[in-house]
Image (spheres, coloured by chain):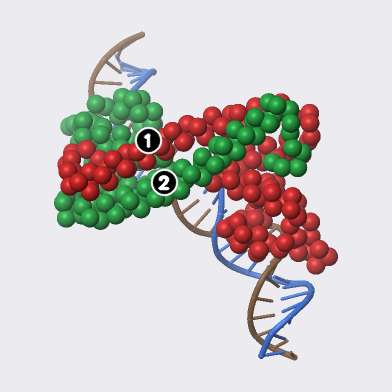
Chain colours: A red, B green, C blue, D brown
DNA sequence: TATTGACTTAAAGCAAACTCTAAGTGATAT
DNA sequence: ATATCACTTAGAGTTTGCTTTAAGTCAATA
């Protein structure tokens, strides 16, 4: 699979895909003799994972580290589990913060709909 | 209330509070004759709002616009409602993305705990 | 009196995550 | 043949949201 197809499938730009590769989040993707990238099914799976985690705001530095450990094999299992748990905690906090803001927006919109706006409170 | 007290109460830095003010998200906060800021209850309410929305990732440009409209009075009610609905939609998408990543992390950690790691999938 | 600490300003600096530019290669369409 | 299009690279530039710096004022304490 060529870079533009992958980009289209995931809603990323080709620049972003090459950037992720340079940062060690995916690949290195193998290239044909013309130097053009050819993404394998395994590459695609990594991109799926990275996209999901990035969409949730996990940092590239974390993904980089996790993937490096993954590639180092079984001896890093304990450390990998620990950093996943750490990221889960960070994510949980963000989810809660966002839920709070979401509820507040809902409440506020409801006030707008009912024409009972409180002049002083945002 | 003085800037350092406000900062402490909200877990923000004084720099951030001054930055928010410069950007038009709060205030302008009134100052004593010594030039020192004195935050009112209304200022505090705005900071609460801004902090909640920022923690959810809403952009400063949006908050700026919303607050400007708010200060322009009732003639902007319709527009304000519209941009709140727009932001709610963006937020909902992010919440869903984050929930997906959270579920995936949970699933993955569960595999680590059960020692049934899939070598190929992240 | 000197120094410590909280405050003030404008402006420069920084980190993260892209995004764009410039210059080039190679295959295909007119 | 020449133009168009997708690809390649290294490196510079951009955006967002702070954060730091430099230089200063003022009040209180050693």
**Letter of the chain that mark 1 sits on in the rendering:** A
Q: Residue A39: percent from the left, percent from the top?
A: 73, 57
Q: Nearer the viewer, residue A50 or B28?
A: A50
- Secondary element under disc 1, as helix, strand or loop, is helix
Q: Is the residue B58 above or below the residue C20 in the image? A: above
Q: Would residue D30 be found to the left or right of residue A40 on screen?
A: left
Does residue B57 appear in the picture of this structure? yes
The quadrant the N terminus of chain B occupies is top left
Q: Nearer the viewer, residue D24 or C23?
A: C23
Give the residue displayed 26% in from the left and 52% down from the top.
Answer: B80
Q: Are marks 2 and 1 on the same chain?
A: no
- Which residue sits at x=30%, y=34%? B48
Q: Name the side, left or right, on which B53 lies relative to A3.
A: left
Residue most extreme to the right: A33
Residue at 37 percent across and 41 percent down: it is A102
Q: Which mark is residue A100?
A: 1
The chain under label 2 reads B
Decide if residue B21 is in sight here.
no
The 10 Å Cα crowd at callout 2, few under 14, some 14 to 19, many 20 or more, is many
The image quarter containing residue D9 is: bottom right
Q: Is B13 left or right of A48, judged from the image as shown?
A: left
Q: How many marks?
A: 2
Around disc 1, counting alpha carbons within 10 Å, would you say few (fewer than 14), some (14 to 19), or many (20 or more)? some
- Badge 2 marks a residue whose secondary structure is helix
Q: Residue B115: give x, y in percent of width and height.
A: 73, 27
Residue B7 image label: none
- Expressed as whole percent of the image width and height from the top left, the position of residue A83 reads 63, 30
Checking the image for residue B91, the label placed there is 2
């Amino acid at each position: 699979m060529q870079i533009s197809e992958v980009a289209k499938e995931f809603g990323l730009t080709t620049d972003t895909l090459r950037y992720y590769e340079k940062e060690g989040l995916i690949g290195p993707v193998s290239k044909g003799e013309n130097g053009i990238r050819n993404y394998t099914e395994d590459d695609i799976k990594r991109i799926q994972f990275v996209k999901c985690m990035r969409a949730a705001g996990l940092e590239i530095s974390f993904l980089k580290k996790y993937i490096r450990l993954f590639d180092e094999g079984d001896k890093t299992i304990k450390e990998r589990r620990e950093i996943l748990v750490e990221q889960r905690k960070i994510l949980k906090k963000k989810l809660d913060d966002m839920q709070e803001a979401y509820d507040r927006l809902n409440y506020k919109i409801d006030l707008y709909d009912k024409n009972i706006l409180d002049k002083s409170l945002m």
